[in-house]
Image (cartoon, rainbow, N blue to C red):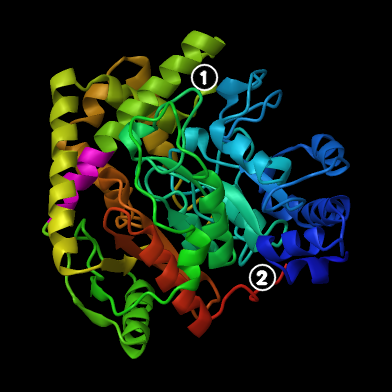
Amino acid sequence: MDYAEYRRFDAVGLAELVSRGEVAPRELLETAIERAEQVNGRLNAIVRPMFDIARERAAQPLSGVLAGVPFLLKDLHQDYAGVRTGAGSRSTRGTTAARHSATVERWLDAGLVIFGRTSTPEFGAKGITEPEASGPTRNPWHTGHTPGGSSGGAAAAVAAGIVPVAGASDGGGSIRIPAACCGLFGLKPGRGLVPAGPDHAEHMHGGATDGVLSRTVRDTAVMLDVLTARPDPGGPYLAARPDTSYAECARREPGRLRIGFTCRSPLGFPVSPHAVAAVKDTAALLSGLGHDVEEAEPAIDGRQLSRDFLAVWFAQAAHAVDGARRTLGAAVDDFELDTRLIAAAGREMRATEYVATLDRWNGYNRALADFHDRYDLLLTPTLAHPPARIGELDTPPLLRRAIALLLKAGLAGKVARTKPVDGVVLKNLEKVPFTQLANITGRPAMSVPTYRTPAGLPLGVQFVGGLGAEPTLLALAAQIEAETPWSHLEPPL
């Protein structure tokens, strides 16, 4: 199969070809590898090829709903036994996974042929993908810009046509941000649906979850069926599922929905006219489809929510750094300067502060639930600004020197938690202030690629649903996809 034909199909379509005997898994794999070798030098999306493993698997009998479809894992948590999980960090070199993660087991059960791991920032801690360990990953639509993060490598690979769908994860927007940057569909499932085992019951109190990035809504729906095929016996709770498959939900009409929208940044920073236009154009489209759409937003202090998100994020960074030093023997210099700074800030938090932060997380659940009493969905920009240029968000050299001195003196953590620095920290979320709400509350949310800037850069819109709203989100996304198709659009690589 040549690339032009391969690119015409999504994952479901490729699996149908395999099941009918019209193409063999090894043919699909070789086409995917050839495409990767053509474009990866310009994108740096795949950081750990697994070609030999994949070729051996493709030669074996495969079964499952996606049997024979080439697939890529995110190089963070999605462990493949015998292969290193780098997590975008120098600190993990020389380590290999002892066993498959639960998500990888389910993807293998579905018959997918895994042939590589995609780039992520160090420990998935940024909304861009520019790790020092492997270098920046670039956006296929314009290689001078970021594909977003932390699933930036996955997004770049899907947008570039290497695979139709790829493994991703989302702890603060890391599926939805790269989906918006690369013109893809990205759904963050709700808390507790997707297993985090075998080493964890959940990630970040359930605020982080695995998922996928795809070109079509139906691929994401089928993947959600794969990932939730059976309950996780080691999970903290049993999440409710619909009375039918998610794939079937995506084929249903969404009905007449009540949708509240806002273009206002919850941090009070300016929002790009392009992001505003993306929301207003989508609101007009939704009204034309018969939905009730009006301006509205949850009664939530966005700045405090961001502080409470970052507090837990920083504590998680401290745990990751300390764990790598303790179990892997990593040296201090094996971590990026920014990672060391936020880890230092995380170590300064008292246990009582941490508990108070989680109490406020629960308060945001209540406030968002009040909003969803009145509206089925919340519509916002996914990004407040178009995708940043590569290097645009680098820490300035003078500030890097100051941070290095503070770290050496053991003062960085204390300084990072002072009021003057608080504004600087919140400023770092200026481009992505909309996505953290769904992580804190554990609600499902999606980015839909409804808009492009005059320069041709994609820019998505976000929908946040209430508990168990995945069927509604998928049905609405499919309705929008039918009205304004996007999967045929291809970057000019």
Closer to the camera in the image, 258 or 441: 258
Circle nearer the viewer, 1 or 2: 2
Residue 174, percent from left and from top: 45, 48
Asked if the residue at tag 2 contacts the one at tag 1, i.e. Cβ–Cβ closer than 8 Å, the answer is no
In three-dimensional space, the C-alpha distance between marks 1 and 2, rounded to whole angstroms, equals 38 Å
Residue 212, percent from left and from top: 54, 51
Position of the N terminus, as image quadrant, is bottom right
Q: Is residue 320 left or right of residue 455?
A: left
- In magenta stretch: residue 308: yes
- Kindly identify the amino acid type of the residue bearing the numbered disc 2: Pro
Mark 2: few/some/many CA within 10 Å (<14, 14-19, 20+) = some
- Kindly identify the amino acid type of the residue bearing the numbered disc 1: Asp
Residue 258, percent from left and from top: 23, 75
User: Does label 1 or label 2 sit earlier along the sequence?
Assistant: 1
- Residue numbers of the magenta segment: 300-309
What residue is pinned by disc 2? Answer: 491
Closer to the camera in the image, 357 or 13: 13
Q: Is residue 196 left or right of residue 147?
A: left
Closer to the camera in the image, 297 or 221: 221
What residue is pinned by disc 1? Answer: 333
Q: Residue furthest front?
A: 243
Residue 72, percent from left and from top: 67, 46
Provide the secondary structure element on which disc 2 rests.
loop
User: In the picture, residue 313 is in which quadrant?
Assistant: top left
